[in-house]
Image (cartoon, grey):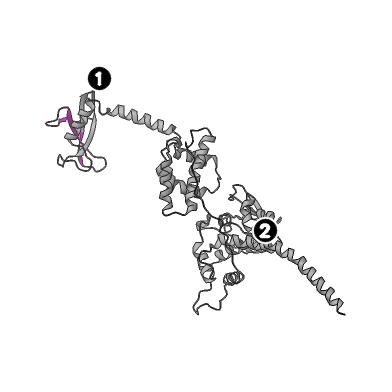
């Protein structure tokens, strides 16, 4: 390739340019070079920048001018700026050093790799990318100050639920503990305090609400329905509701349920990636079996497949239609609420003890099941009153016998 002609920039010592063509626009441009000696006396010649030919000397769009090239030359002669080669080497060294730092971004990748089926992975992924990556991603735990966490807490509290705030802060603490346990780097130099969250909301349906819900699922017309009421029910939503009622399964457990997870012969359902973090099994009741066997099997491995046969992520719209027609409370969460309905009815039946209920709900700790203890207490009180009634009836017969 022939050597391009050097053209000296008039009025600027040590600055010249060559005419070339921009690979991006195809337009002719000036490629500026500077020639100088650095503070050590070494002679250096290097590129300073480029600019389109037809333009004024005023700076436009970040392009180079002869004046700007001259300023760069002066700074590098005085040692205020590094030459291109030295700067690239410094940037490369800094990048390599940064890649060796255990920042939260790097810790997050390592944490995920160490837990391929980690608990609540989707929620953790969302919380990290949306709330932690920007403020803390390029920092090591030891570089985070308590004020940084306080600012995050206040920012989230403005428009997020307390439970979300707690989950984000808990993930930050979990990553810090992970770094310490694996001896990757020093953890946060302070304790992250968690906001108090009252999540012990127990949703239930009374007999009338339950009757309306079941009527809606059957596609029946209700007495207070308008003449043009649409009584059709999405079959997927209907079967999901029935399965939640019959098993108490969580929303994600139902959506992840595959045909291979059903053991019809032994009568068990295998739940994968449960909230407790491990696979577990629950009994397959006859009613639940009928719901599953009534499903049309497709090429998808999922019993309730989503788009293109993959794992379903939502069914909210169809469930809200059911909730509105059944006139269930506005705050009632169709699937999470039905899990509470399942637990409440079993606890208040007097036929299921809390330990059995814990196993059916796949609670890792009995503390979560304790929220239903007051229902079994009511059963115990009814049982205690049985003996009182028996004694009273016996006394009544005795008194009646004396009269004769």
Q: Is residue 30 magenta?
A: yes
Give above or below for 225 relative to 198: below
Residue 20 position within the rendered picture, expressed as x and y whole percent measured from the top left: 21, 36
On the image, numbered disc 1 is attached to which residue?
40
Mark found first going from the N terminus, 1 or 2:
1
> Which x, y percent locates residue 295?
60, 63
Callout 1: SS? loop
Pointer 2 local density, CA inside 10 Å: few below 14, some 14–19, many at least 20: many
- Left or right relative to 305: residue 154: left
Q: Nearer the viewer, residue 306 or 384?
A: 384
Query: Which quarter of the picture shows residue 133?
Result: top left
- Check if residue 254 falls in the magenta segment: no
- Image quadrant assignment for residue 401: bottom right
Quarter of the picture holding the C terminus: bottom right
Q: Which residue is mark 2?
A: 284
Residue at figure coordinates x 57%, y 66% from the top left: 238
- Foreground residue among 81 and 292: 81
Label 2 SS: loop
Quick check: 221 left or right of 347? left
Q: Is residue 63 left or right of residue 193?
A: left
Highlighted magenta segment, given as a residue range = 3-31
Q: Nearer the viewer, residue 150 or 260?
A: 150
């Amino acid at each position: 390739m022939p050597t391009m002609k050097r053209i000296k920039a008039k009025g600027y010592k040590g600055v010249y340019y060559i005419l070339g063509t921009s690979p991006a626009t195809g337009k002719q441009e000036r490629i500026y070079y500077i020639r100088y000696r650095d503070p050590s006396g070494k002679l250096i010649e290097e590129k300073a920048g480029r600019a389109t030919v037809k333009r004024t000397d005023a700076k436009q769009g970040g392009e180079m001018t002869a004046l700007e090239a001259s300023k760069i030359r002066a700074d590098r002669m005085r040692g205020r700026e590094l030459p291109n080669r030295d700067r690239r080497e410094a940037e490369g060294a800094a990048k390599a050093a940064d890649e060796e730092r255990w920042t939260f971004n790097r810790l997050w990748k390592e944490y995920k790799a160490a837990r391929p089926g980690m608990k609540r992975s989707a929620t953790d992924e969302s919380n990290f990318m949306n709330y932690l990556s920007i403020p803390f991603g390029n920092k090591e735990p030891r570089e985070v100050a308590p004020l940084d966490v306080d600012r995050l807490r206040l920012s989230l509290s403005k428009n997020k639920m307390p439970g979300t705030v707690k989950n984000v802060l808990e993930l930050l603490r979990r990553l810090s503990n992970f770094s310490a346990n694996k001896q990757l780097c020093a953890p946060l130099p302070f304790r992250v305090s968690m906001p108090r969250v009252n999540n012990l909301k127990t949703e239930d349906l009374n007999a009338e609400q339950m009757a309306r819900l079941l009527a809606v699922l059957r596609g029946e017309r209700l007495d207070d329905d308008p003449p043009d009421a649409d009584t059709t029910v999405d079959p997927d939503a209907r079967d999901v509701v029935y399965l939640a009622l019959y098993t108490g399964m969580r929303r994600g457990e139902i959506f992840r349920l595959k045909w291979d997870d059903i053991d019809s012969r032994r009568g068990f359902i295998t739940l994968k990636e449960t909230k407790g973090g491990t696979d577990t099994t629950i009994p397959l009741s006859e009613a639940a079996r009928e719901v599953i066997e009534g499903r049309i099997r497709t090429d998808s491995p999922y019993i309730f497949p989503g788009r293109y046969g993959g794992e379903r992520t939502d069914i909210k719209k169809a469930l809200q239609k059911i909730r509105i027609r059944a006139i269930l409370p506005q705050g009632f969460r169709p699937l999470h609420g039905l899990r509470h309905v399942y637990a409440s009815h079993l606890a208040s039946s007097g036929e299921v003890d809390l330990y059995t209920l814990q196993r059916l709900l796949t609670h890792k700790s009995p503390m979560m099941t304790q929220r239903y203890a007051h229902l079994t207490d009511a059963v115990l009180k009814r049982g205690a009153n049985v003996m009182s009634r028996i004694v009273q009836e016996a006394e009544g017969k005795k008194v009646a016998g004396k009269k004769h």
